[in-house]
Image (tube, rainbow, N blue to C red):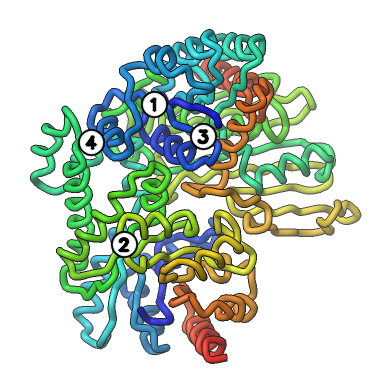
Amino acid sequence: MARIGIIGVGKMGLSHLAIFGAHPDVEIVGIVEPQSFVASAVKSQTGIETYKNHERLIDETRPDAIVVATPSVTHVEVASYALEHDVQVFVEKPLTLSSADSWRLSQLAVSRGLANQVGYHNRFIGTFQEVARLVQAGAVGQVYHVDGKASGPVVTKPKTGFTWRSKKSEGGGCLHDYASHVVDLMNFVVGPPKSVVGARLHNIYSKDVEDAVYALFDYAGGFSGQLETNWSDETHRKMSTTIAVYGSHGKILADRQELQVFLKKGASFEQYPEGWTTRYITDLQAPVSYYLRGEEYSAQVDAFVEAVDKRNPHPQNSFESAYATDWTIDRIIERDKAGR
Amino acid sequence: MDRIMFGDNQFFGVNHMSEEKARAQAVRFKETSSIVKVLRDAYEAGIRTFMCTTHDQIGDVVDEIERRGDFDGFVYYPGMPYAHKYANAVSELGVMETVKQYAPGGMMEMLVKGARSAMRKDVEQLMSMLVDAEMKRFAKADTPVIFLQNVITDLLLGLKMHDLFKDFADHVKSHYGAEAGFFSMNMPMLVPVLEKVGIERPIVCCNYNKIGFRMSGGIEAYDHALETTSVRCVAMSVLASGAIPPEEAIRWICERPRIESIVFGASSRGNIQQTVSLINQYTQA
């Protein structure tokens, strides 16, 4: 039985509270949430104790692990305190707002032998896992380009600014919110880029943060990558993420539901014949024991609970892999500034 | 409940397999009249129950059907809330601002009080107000069963806020004379909880298909719950978004006599008629 505390019960924290709460091997020892309506609703309905801050929760309950779902700017402080007190940590993405901080956290977790994981849930989606497997097995031959995109309707008109998501200083904006997911997915499939060739951050409706991010990457393997993310695109009902990989033997297109593989003549691979093959999430996703918003959210929680049990400091989506994502984000910011 | 019900995913750009298909459908059903035309095809195929999300466009659909006056005996099973609207708003506005924006008058006062603490009755009252706001669109319609969408059902299930299920059921009974229904992706986990909080013979709409797609706990757990609990089950996603051929899918589901109803969505007259006749054929067999 893993004893787990949830730090921050906003949009993501509520989801984690439910998924961890439904896990048969987890006991929720407490939550930290400054909005008293939410905190007291949880307490009055479920009896789960609320604590004033993460220090109190950790000192008083001595949990095996915590989930950090606070505004991004606070991740480094909360995660550091936990790791220094021998508490294993799951952090919502992005890990931190600076790759130097992310590297330090990663080293701290590994040196203490503590499980550490970041909520880049795309790595737990069956279609994307198959893309990574196929590319790494050489199914499309020599890769020459990778293309990652995400669009959705988060900020679709001027004004607002009610939450930390619209404040740059707290880690708001499309870059840390949407683009980080796509950078991480591209890293998952082809590894991190060696440099960011060019980048542009656009304000469409927001004042303090960017609403769209476009960037071009160079990879050590001699290929290129393109990133295109926009959270002000209301043509999508919800966040939609796609990846395309182009290689000498064919190409692969995938989103959350669908995987399309094209292989050139004479380049069939395993069960994938020449020409187009389409596979769906219905046959690529392993089932979960509790479903809330997608199998991937439950699958990442299952993986973390297992890592906590084994005190495995190198799980999928470790701090180290999230550091590589934050490194790329830092380079995107630099290139955008340099180009202005 | 009718044996066959008509769903609405196809109208609102939802397709669990293909985002491209979803987009094409969203374009096709931009106009309310094209939705009503398909509903008319369903009506002529003998369907009398429309299970629909409280999407923004649904009010226009209800009004148009009322205006036409040729949908005798047509009933609605609303499923609420249309969760993406709230999820996107929570990202942009935060939980409290979202509640303020979407909840009707009287809410502010309650929130000021709630800023200190939330008692059980406050949460219950908040839920009731949000239900009433969603139900405004159905003022003229017959709604014998009112459903809670799976995102909310399964969230409350995981959070163990189980008393709210009973509060919801009591509210829709007293205010709308309706029975409560629950969409869920976790039927075997949910049903004992609903029974425990005092909801008799709970109505649950869940995925039920031959490949076990989105059936948390697996087909065996679902079959076991069907046989050993009082659940009145409405099967959805019987074709697993098209992964199973229609005849095979429907024969399989009809081998489970404890399944009370089947809900499906389709856009063409031919597909509607074919599905209805397959269900009728294998139900009798």
The disc label shown at residue B97, or none: 4
Q: Which of B233 and A277 is in front in this view?
A: B233
**Residue pictured at 78% horizontal, 27% vertical:** A222
In percent of width and height, residue B21 lies at 53, 62
Give left or right: position of A103 versus B9.
right
User: Distance from label 4 to label 1 (Cα)?
Assistant: 25 Å
Side of B140 where A293 appears, left or right: right
Instruction: Using the image, name the chain to which the residue with label 2 belongs.
Output: B
CA gap, disc 2 and disc 1: 29 Å
Rendered position, A309 above or below B109: above
Q: Nearer the viewer, mark 4 or mark 1?
A: 1
Mark 1 chain: A
| Residue type (three-letter) at the residue carrying disc 3 | Val
Nearest the viewer among B74 and B60 is B74
Which residue corresponds to mark 2? B199
Given residues A336 and B38, the one toward you in this image is B38
Q: In this rendering, does residue A148 appear at all?
A: no
Q: In the rendered view, would you say A257 is above or below B256?
A: above
Q: Which chain carries label 3?
A: A
Say what secondary structure mark 2 lies in. loop
| Residue, disc 3 | A26
Vertical side of B193 occupied by B31: above or below:
below
The quadrant the N terminus of chain A occupies is: top right
Q: What element carries label 4?
A: helix
Residue A39 point in image, percent of width and height: 29, 30
Amino acid type, residue under disc 2 in the picture: Ile
